[in-house]
Amino acid sequence: MSGGDAVTTHGLCKRYGGETALEEVNLRVPEGGVYVLAGANGAGKSTTLKVLMNLERADAGTAEIQGLDTVRRGPEARAQVGYVPERPGHGYGWMTCRSLMKHVSAYYATWDHAYADRLSLAFGLGLDRRAGTLSKGESRRLQLVLALAHRPPVLLLDEPTDGLDPVVRSRTLSLLAEHLADTPTTILISTHQIHELESLGDHVGILLQGRLVAQMSRDELQRTVGRYRVEVPSGWQATHELHAAGVLSSGAREAQWTLVGDQRELVDRLTLAGAHVREVESLALADAVHAFLAQEVTR
Amino acid sequence: MPSVRELSSQLVVNPRTVWQAYQELEREGVLYVRRGQGTFVSPDVRADRRAVAREVAKRALLEARRSGLGVEELMETIRKVANEEVEEPLVPAPSAKPASSSKRGDGK
């Protein structure tokens, strides 16, 4: 695996009327990475993926997939991608799953029929059902099969476990891990269920109101966000700044904060404020992302 | 040991992480790879465990002597304390699971 980026965007902007959907988004998804795109509803996750698929035109900026401009060389770029869209509905509702798969497979030289069958079986997909009659969860599974079966170098997954029951959810994640082990793949995955990707994701990007407020590797995130357990003298008052950062719990002699920033600097600041730092604990991926968002919102 | 593919699928862990853990454990001599057959736990690990146990025993004896305790007295107390801590045993079961051994590897 080379050290390049598989998916990049440069100054991507998108407006819907007066609403800003994306503002100067510079995404960098390293090749072979599992990049978790996090953010609240309407933060711009789906719009980002749609722009990459050329389903939406950006007002400004460019995007590349495997070095191919997504507008000027769109068809070539999209040939490299397996995409699971935000919503089901693929205009071929009258086709059975089997014929839809056959239809889609014609577009990809790399389509793996045996793998498609295996995935359909694992997902319990009824191949004789018409695509238009599938439930939300079943459509999701069909989309996953269509996205994975040609073993594309890049997977763009928009809430891939949305609408799936817990059993299928965990099976989907297992299949994704297996897919990664079998096929060199870069995955850009938007999700609200960040905890599901706790051990699968190795990079994270956080969107807040169309701005990419953080983008880093998992290791870097681990170093940047921590839970600080401190011992304080009795009657000690937290500085305004620390209060703003959010007290997690506070006893008579002990307090805990979830803080974002350089660890050494934060320890210095706490020490200067008269607190004795006992322990710095790293957080789960979802908690770290939430801490980041909370900090950005109060800023 | 399960294959990287199997374990990453089972635990939903990035295969790269599993691979790194296996590499690390192999470097430490805990695991060894037999080509075409898979990854196995080294028999030496058991010998290592015995060596660790000897060291721990030596240290405990030293402490006991310093405090004027006899060997029998110490052994008796160790058993008693161990029985009291059944819920949270001090010594892990000898058949350590792969998950716990890879955790140990990550911690280094």
Image (spheres, rainbow, N blue to C red):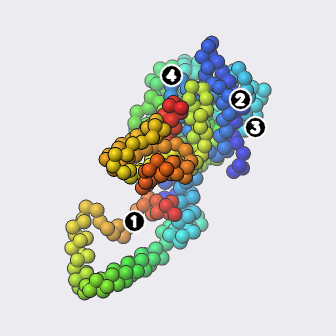
The chain letter for the residue carrying disc 1 is B
What residue did someone put label 2 on? A11
Q: Which residue is mark 3?
A: A67
Amino acid type at mark 3: Gly
Residue at the spot 73% in from the left edge and 28% down from the top edge: A62
Whether discs 4 and 1 lie on one chain: the answer is no
Total labels drawn: 4
Distance from Cα at disc 3 to Cα at disc 4: 37 Å
Q: CA distance from mark 2 to mark 3?
A: 16 Å
Q: Secondary structure at mark 3?
A: loop
Marks 2 and 3, the one that precedes in the sequence: 2
Residue at image location 61% in from the left, 29% down from the top: A211
Residue beneath label 4, please? A130
Pinpoint residue A89: horizontal percent, then vertical percent. 55, 21
Residue in the picture at 76% in, 31% down: A69
Q: Quadrant of residue B94?
A: bottom left
**Label 1 is placed on what type of residue?**
Ala
